[in-house]
Image (cartoon, rainbow, N blue to C red):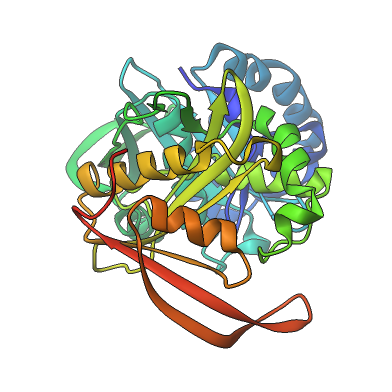
Amino acid sequence: MLNSSLLPIRNDQVVLRAMRTDDASAYAAGTDDAAVREYGHLPESEYTKDSVLALVQGPIREGLDRGDLAVLTIADPSTDDFAGSLVLFGATHTSIEVGFWIHPDRRGEHLSAAALALATEFVRRSGFTSVTARTVLANVASQQVLERSGYVRGEQTRGTAPSGESAVLLHYRRPVETTSLFPLTTERLRLRLHEHQDAQPLQRIYGRADVTQFLLDEPWSESDAVRYVSERIVHAGLDDGDTKLALVIERDGAVIGDVALWLTSPEYPVAEIGWVLDPECQGQGLASEAVRAVLMTAFTHYRLHRVAAQMDARNGASAKLAQRVGMKAEAHLRQNWWSKGEWTDTLIYGALAGEVNES
């Protein structure tokens, strides 16, 4: 079933969130567009603000609560305004279907592909192993978006669209890798994917000036934490075309930091790693334990060739940690990065497969 607690989720281009009553007017106006009417095959023949309000307060909310239907808003990440709709429906034990449309005022901004990427991660973290889609033959734009998003074209059949009309439909399917690899466990730690409830404990850590001193971030506010966590929720691995993994570090159920791993090349198995630990937990080898576990996963599960770590040269603690886990000092770049009003030096450490200390 769909895990609504993961919403909202975001990337640089869109936010995918539960539909709200203040979306009703924009939704109704969007469905009055000729292209949406022709290709959307929406269940209702006409939508008004009042009819959409009734849906939001009734079937839409109930479907999300049940976990078998999600009528979601594609929103602008800077304003949170309605930009389109994405629907997940027809859930089985392993598969779910997706449909989407973009408000006519927002077409041409590549929002569909960005929303589909978020939907894939939402589906993945909800436990489904495939997503399907159907489109009419004339809807070439949707076919192109689906194919760019990893969907494979299948058979062409005559069937019943969500509108209830009979139509010739082109079927698509996208397999989804599961997140069964996580959480990772070590002797003292549990490393798991992010959840919205992590915003407060992470803000307590990232809100400290001594933590962000050598990072690119300024100390996080509460709203910063909410936004960053909603981005990290979808960073669930490096499988299936995904490029980022973000894990929370827990000790005895308490959040004490996080580790991130991200691909730095679209073509080659090379990545970068970064980490943050609560200063109250330093000096116990916990950061090394967490970083070592992620590096081992990078090399043994994801089969990466190389992982690098870049850090402010003044960050001696991180440099020592990199050395402890078996990373090699490779470069000291002098005043190469303008950070917080000054030129700073960068240290680069790297590890190849087989070079990481397991203990």
Q: Residue 276: x and y, percent?
A: 59, 48
Q: Is residue 88 left or right of residue 6?
A: left
Camera-nearest residue between 345 and 115: 345
Residue 61 shows up from this direction: yes
Camera-nearest residue between 336 and 108: 336
> Does residue 67 lie above or below 228 as drawn?
above
Q: Residue 92: x and y, percent?
A: 34, 17
> Does residue 217 lie above or below 238 as drawn?
below
Q: Which residue sits at x=40%, y=33%?
A: 124
Q: Which residue sits at x=51%, y=42%?
A: 287
Q: Residue 295: x and y, percent?
A: 34, 47
Q: Is residue 45 left or right of residue 226?
A: left
The number of numbered badges drawn on the structure is 0
Q: Is residue 220 left or right of residue 151?
A: right
Q: Residue 333: x and y, percent?
A: 50, 84
Residue 40 shows up from this direction: no
